[in-house]
Image (tube, helix red, strand yellow):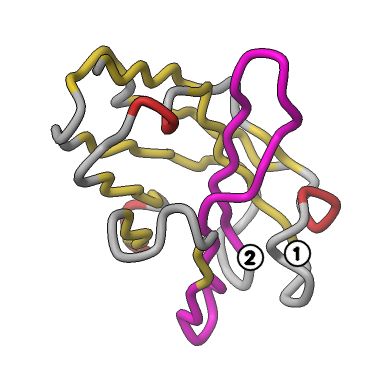
Amino acid sequence: QVQLVESGGGLVQAGDSLTLSCAASGRTFSPYSMGWFRQAPGKEREFVAAIRWSGGRIYYADSVKDRFTISGDNAKNTVYLQMNSLKPEDTAVYYCAAGLSITGITSPNAYTDWGQGTRVTVSS
């Protein structure tokens, strides 16, 4: 099992930037896929971004493409989500996830391990 701990959330204004971090410990990090999902109040959890640890292929939700960047540091067992030009609709709890699947990684079903979440609030 992999333990995931997110950090970096907070309250920001529209247009600001934040970087979320997700530190993994436990089972070997590679060849996992890592993903970021978010859940806004009253809404279902939705895909934000994902990275295949082996090969580095990256996926983004259309709503965050060109604003968010996912990256990973294998040596630190950490995945990051750089969020720029934040909008009020980005307000949500952001979750980091890890899984052994390399297909279907935009679906939460591809992940077996989840962090506790970090809250991001964007004011207008």
> Which residues make up the magenta segment?
33-58
Please state if 50 lies on the left or on the right of 123 as rendered.
Answer: right
Residue 57 x, y percent position in the rendering: 50, 81
The one nearer the camera, 53 or 36, is 36
Residue 116 x, y percent position in the rendering: 59, 20
The one nearer the camera, 8 or 15, is 15
Of the image marks 1 and 2, the number of the one nearer the N terminus: 2
Please state if 118 lies on the left or on the right of 26 as rendered.
Answer: left
Residue 109 x, y percent position in the rendering: 85, 52
The one nearer the camera, 114 or 3, is 114
The quadrant of the rendering that contains the C terminus is top left
Please state if 26 lies on the left or on the right of 49 as rendered.
Answer: right
Labels 1 & 2 near each other (Cβ < 8 A): yes
Which residue is situated farthest in the bottom direction here? 55
SS label for mark 2? loop
Q: Residues within 10 Å of mark 1 (few under 14, many from 20)?
A: some
Measuring 62% from the left and 72% from the top, which residue is drawn there? 31
> Callout 1, which amino acid?
Leu
Distance between the Cα atoms at labels 1 and 2?
A: 5 Å
Residue 78 x, y percent position in the rendering: 38, 49
Query: Which of the numbered marks, if any, corresponds to residue 32?
Result: 2
In this rendering, the answer to whether 25 lies above or below 64 is above
Measuring 53% from the left and 40% from the top, which residue is drawn there? 25
SS label for mark 1? loop
Residue matched to label 1: 100
Measuring 20% from the left and 27% from the top, which residue is drawn there? 14
Which residue is situated farthest in the front direction here? 124
Q: Residues within 10 Å of mark 2 (few under 14, many from 20)?
A: some
Which residue is situated farthest in the right direction here? 109
Measuring 27% from the left and 45% from the top, which residue is drawn there? 83
Quadrant of res 21? top left
